[in-house]
Image (spheres, rainbow, N blue to C red):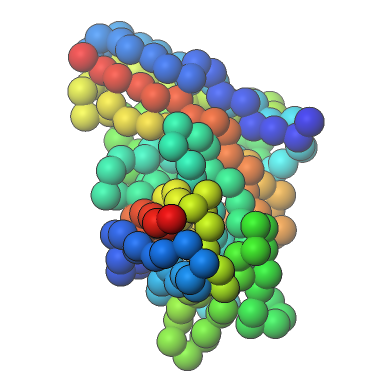
Amino acid sequence: EAQVTQNPRYLITVTGKKLTVTCSQNMNHEYMSWYRQDPGLGLRQIYYSMNVEVTDKGDVPEGYKVSRKEKRNFPLILESPSPNQTSLYFCASSLLGAGGYTFGSGTRLTVV
Amino acid sequence: AQSVAQPEDQVNVAEGNPLTVKCTYSVSGNPYLFWYVQYPNRGLQFLLKYITGDNLVKGSYGFEAEFNKSQTSFHLKKPSALVSDSALYFCAVSSPPGGTSYGKLTFGQGTILTVHP
């Protein structure tokens, strides 16, 4: 089944403790992206990647890192999480130029 | 910079009546436009997209959307609403190949659709 898989689905952590949210897609898509969803703000793009080793900042990149060493994986790294990063996070992938993005099921992160 | 506006935070409609969820956009060049739906505690599901061609686009679950270039709008419509259509709807825009924001998908803030029995 074609899908984007995120792990974990739920995560509670403490301020300052590094964490990684994984994202993997099995559709050979070039494009991958991370979004955070907050009430009243919709989805805001954190980082995106047009292909392996090609990443760029989205609208809200502060406090986040990403890497794209393989085409299928695009992990989101929070080096020192803070409470304002408590949010619902989505990973998405797409064939460039084709439109139609496939989203993962989301990761609900709480930083206390 | 590209942007999307969904002017209504909430839309309420009676079952069986037509529904419209509004969306306007701003982007350099010709837009790629999308509608997604999110049910509670679920991810986003793709409904439909406009890339080029016919201004009326048909999508999943009986939804359709009309692209209006002069008004820079892409309103989502359905002729007869169902209670099961109640969800959070997002409009999104991206640039075509060669555009300054090619590959970047920008979302509106979302509209909560409630269909009453």
Q: Is residue A16 visible?
A: yes
Image quadrant occupied by the C terminus of chain A: top left
Residue B84: give x, y in percent of width and height.
Answer: 52, 49
Residue B55: give x, y in percent of width and height.
Answer: 63, 82
Please tell me which residue is depicted at 61% across the width and 51% down the height of the picture: B46
Q: Is residue A71 visible?
A: no
Instruction: Reply above or below: A65 against A49.
Output: above
Instruction: Reply above or below: A8 against B11.
Output: above
The quadrant holding residue B20 is bottom left
Question: Is B13 on the left-hand or right-hand side of B58?
Answer: left
Residue B27: give x, y in percent of width and height.
Answer: 45, 72
In depth, the one of B87 and A74 nearer the eye is B87
The quadrant holding residue A19 is top left
In depth, the one of A98 and B1 nearer the eye is A98
In depth, the one of B76 and B62 nearer the eye is B62
Please tell me which residue is depicted at 33% across the width and 12% down the height of the picture: A12
Residue B9: give x, y in percent of width and height.
Answer: 29, 59
